Image (cartoon, rainbow, N blue to C red):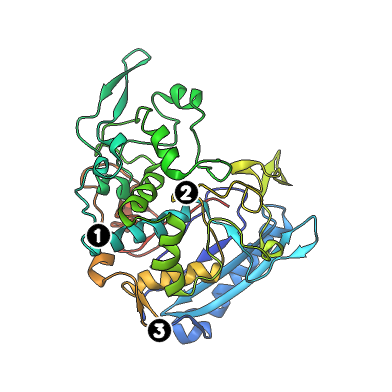
């Protein structure tokens, strides 16, 4: 099973791909009962999502449920843009934030398959400024010291979020704030992701490499590394290796001309009321995806996509690396990505973390329904 969870009240896209059995076939529509789902149970999902709109918790959503390689439920709710009185549409384009990470992780693994990259490679082999990093270590009683990292960060560390880098909000966070390098938003920056990573490298990580799972700039750094290894900008790499082969026509870093009327507006909660976020407003606003520098390809949170595009990507992973006769990864690489690599590093109860995806290992410990072997990831908006 694959699930994606969302952690912000500005939720606009719900994408649930509940595919319990991988299929080599394309995503075509079927009745729920034909793939072992219940129309009655799916109506509960409709009731819940309609309730979120009616109660002012979200402006709208697109919901897709697929199983056994077939779409059994594909519905829209609410509005794409409340101020314009524009209803939500099935092909609405959303900012997918951290759901970008899984895509960039797959791109990195295509280079591993080609022998151009090893999981054990030090990141500094490709990004020299990260060969010797610094770590902020908290002092007992307050304050912190800056020390050398005990070992180089590896490619595996980036894929598993164990490099030690967060989003600038851990130990030594004051230095990150002073450098104006916090949070996941890069679309407003008049610099490349390679230049952003050079600035990140001057700041201390929040933990020693390979010792803690810390959510942060790992996949942004990975994207810059992928650019160096492939010798191309990240947008071209993703388009050639993933988007075009899978028919993901609306997935990109910045909105193409003619698609403005499909971009979902971003809303957020303020004193219990849903409000349109500011324009552009950076991470908590409409963003710079229409008007902006269009220079920074953030692998960690920069992509736009649609429900059907992302479903095609996920079905490829569920199929063991291929879809519609186009192979992106080998089955064994997908197995490697969806196996926990954390060892004894603590993570969420009952779960481990693979190469770009969480992995369910113990349902009882997790304490919520699902399946052992379930994997996935989520994102804001």
Query: In the rendered image, which residue does mark 1 sit on?
Result: 112
Identify the element where label 1 is drawn.
helix
Kindly indicate whether the residue at mark 2 contacts the one at mark 3 (C-beta within 8 angstroms). no
Which quarter of the figure is the N terminus placed in?
bottom left
Residue at 58% in and 68% down: 63
* Tally of marks: 3
Kindly indicate whether the residue at mark 1 contacts the one at mark 2 (C-beta within 8 angstroms). no
Residue 89 position, x and y percent, is 68, 69
**What is the crowding at mark 2: few (fewer than 14 residues within 10 Å), some, or many (at least 20)?**
many
Identify the element where label 3 is drawn.
loop
Disc 3 to disc 2, C-alpha distance:
31 Å
Of the pair 308 and 11, the residue shown nearer to us: 308
Residue at 50% in and 23% down: 178
- Above or below, 134 relative to 153: above
Residue at 69% in and 55% down: 265
Which comes before the other along the chain, label 2 or label 1? 1
Which comes before the other along the chain, label 3 or label 1? 3
Which comes before the other along the chain, label 3 or label 2? 3
Residue 98 position, x and y percent, is 47, 51
Disc 3 to disc 1, C-alpha distance:
26 Å
Q: Quadrant of residue 166?
A: top left
- Above or below, 341 relative to 316: above
Identify the element where label 2 is drawn.
loop
**What is the crowding at mark 1: few (fewer than 14 residues within 10 Å), some, or many (at least 20)?**
some
Query: In the rendered image, which residue does mark 2 sit on?
Result: 298
Q: Quadrant of residue 128?
A: top left
- Specify the label residue 25 is tagged with: 3
Q: Nearer the viewer, mark 3 or mark 1?
A: 1
Residue 39 position, x and y percent, is 56, 79
In this rendering, does residue 21 appear at all? Answer: no
180 relative position to 212: left or right:
right
């Amino acid at each position: 099973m694959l699930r994606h969870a969302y952690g912000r009240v500005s939720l606009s896209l719900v994408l649930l791909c509940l595919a319990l059995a991988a299929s080599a076939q394309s995503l075509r529509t079927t009745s729920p009962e034909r793939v072992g789902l219940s129309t009655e149970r799916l109506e509960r999902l409709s009731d819940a999502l309609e309730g979120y709109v009616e109660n002012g918790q979200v402006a709208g959503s697109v919901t897709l449920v697929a199983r056994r390689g077939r779409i059994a439920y594909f519905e829209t709710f609410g509005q794409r843009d409340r101020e314009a009185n524009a209803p939500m549409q099935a092909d609405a384009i959303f900012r997918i934030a951290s759901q970008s990470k899984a895509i960039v992780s797959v791109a990195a693994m295509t280079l591993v398959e080609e022998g151009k990259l090893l999981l054990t490679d030090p990141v500094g082999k490709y990004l020299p400024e990260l060969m010797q990093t610094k770590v902020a270590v908290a002092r007992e009683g307050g304050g912190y010291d800056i020390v050398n990292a005990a070992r180089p960060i590896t490619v595996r560390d980036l894929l598993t979020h164990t490099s030690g880098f967060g989003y600038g909000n851990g130990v030594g966070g004051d230095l990150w704030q002073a450098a104006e390098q916090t949070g996941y938003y890069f679309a407003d920056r008049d610099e490349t992701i390679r230049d952003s990573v050079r600035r990140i490298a001057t700041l201390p990580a929040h933990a020693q490499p390979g010792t803690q799972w810390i959510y942060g700039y790992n996949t942004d750094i990975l994207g810059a590394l992928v650019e160096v290894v492939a010798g191309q900008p990240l947008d071209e790499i993703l388009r050639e290796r993933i988007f075009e082969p899978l028919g993901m026509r609306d997935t990109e870093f910045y909105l193409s001309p003619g698609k403005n009327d499909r971009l979902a507006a971003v809303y957020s909660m303020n004193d219990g009321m849903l409000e349109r976020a500011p324009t552009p407003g950076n991470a908590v606003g409409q963003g710079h995806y229409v008007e902006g520098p269009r220079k920074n390809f953030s692998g960690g949170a920069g992509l736009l996509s649609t429900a059907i595009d992302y479903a095609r990507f996920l079905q490829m992973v569920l199929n063991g690396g291929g879809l519609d006769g186009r192979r992106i990864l080998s089955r064994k690489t997908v197995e490697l990505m969806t196996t926990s690599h954390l060892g004894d590093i603590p993570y969420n109860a009952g779960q481990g973390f693979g190469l770009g995806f969480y992995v369910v290992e113990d349902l009882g410990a997790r304490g919520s329904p699902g399946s052992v072997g379930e994997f996935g990831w989520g994102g804001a908006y």
